[in-house]
Amino acid sequence: MAHVLAVSDVEDDVLCARLASGSLGPVDVVVSCGDLRPGYLDYVATMANAPLVYVRGNHDTDEAGYADCGGIPLDMTLERIAGLAFVGLDGSIDYREDIVGYSEAQMAARATVLAAKAKLMGGVDVLVCHTPPRGYGDMDDLPHRGFKCYNRLLKVLRPKIMLSGHVHLNYGMRKREHEHPSGARIINAYGYWYGEIGPQSLPST
């Protein structure tokens, strides 16, 4: 089992306090699902004493800053850390010019390439994206709409877990977790999520 700390969208004071006090528990890998300052990610990974992997959110247009934060980019790649195989995709639906955004067709093409790479490298445990799949924790307005192609990607890759963010849990009554027909648990890492991932994924805190 690997202890995974996933973060997304907002800098969480409760998480910082738990990391400072040592009350969170062991962390084997920190996963960022996007829209967080590189400086914050560096702080979290340093306090957790764990490697950082990340995808960029729609507002993470400063590629140089992310390159300097000491993390490993997951976009369109597979990384094996703490006994788990991670793959990722940056960005959200393209709803304006100044964001990291893709059309549905563009993301579908990227997802097809990523799926081929992942299958050649032996499969995936964790899929990391900024946005959720369409129909699983997204919203109806265009900026917060999930990608339909992620549903196909989950069926092809069959990861144990999909970690995402983008849809803030304070946008009304939002669920943190959804079950997908592929068997994947789709987890919204808004703020933070901490849990174990392994052959039998366990409930989180």
Image: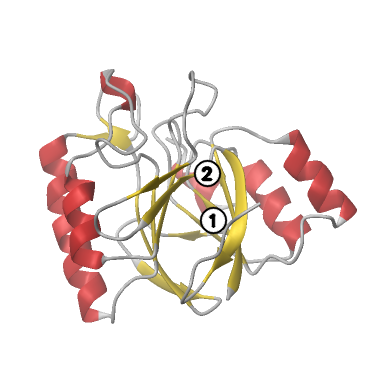
Instruction: Please rate how many residues cluster around mark 1, counting C-alpha atoms within 10 Å: few if below 14, some from 14 to 19, many from 20.
Output: many
Residue 117, quarter of picture? bottom left
State the residue at coordinates (60%, 55%).
204
State the residue at coordinates (57%, 58%).
203
Q: Is residue 97 visible?
A: no
CB atoms of marks 2 and 1 within 8 Å: yes
Q: Using the image, tell me which numbered label, if any, was put on residue 31.
A: 1
Q: Earlier in the sequence, mark 2 or mark 1?
A: 1
The residue tagged 2 is: 189
On screen, residue 132 above or below 174: below
Q: Secondary structure at mark 1?
A: strand
Residue 196, percent from left and from top:
58, 65
Residue 140, quarter of picture? top left
Q: Using the image, tell me which numbered label, if any, was put on residue 7.
A: none
192 and 57: which one is in front? 192
Left or right of 168 on screen, residue 119: left
Q: Is residue 44 visible?
A: yes
Which numbered disc, 2 or 1, marks the residue closer to the eye?
A: 2
Instruction: Please rate how many residues cluster around mark 2, counting C-alpha atoms within 10 Å: few if below 14, some from 14 to 19, many from 20.
Output: many
The three-letter code of the residue at mark 1 reads Val
Left or right of 44 on screen, residue 136: left
State the residue at coordinates (50%, 67%).
201
On screen, residue 193 above or below 139: below
Residue 195, quarter of picture? bottom right
Structure colour scheme: secondary structure
Determine the CA span between mark 2 and mark 1.
9 Å
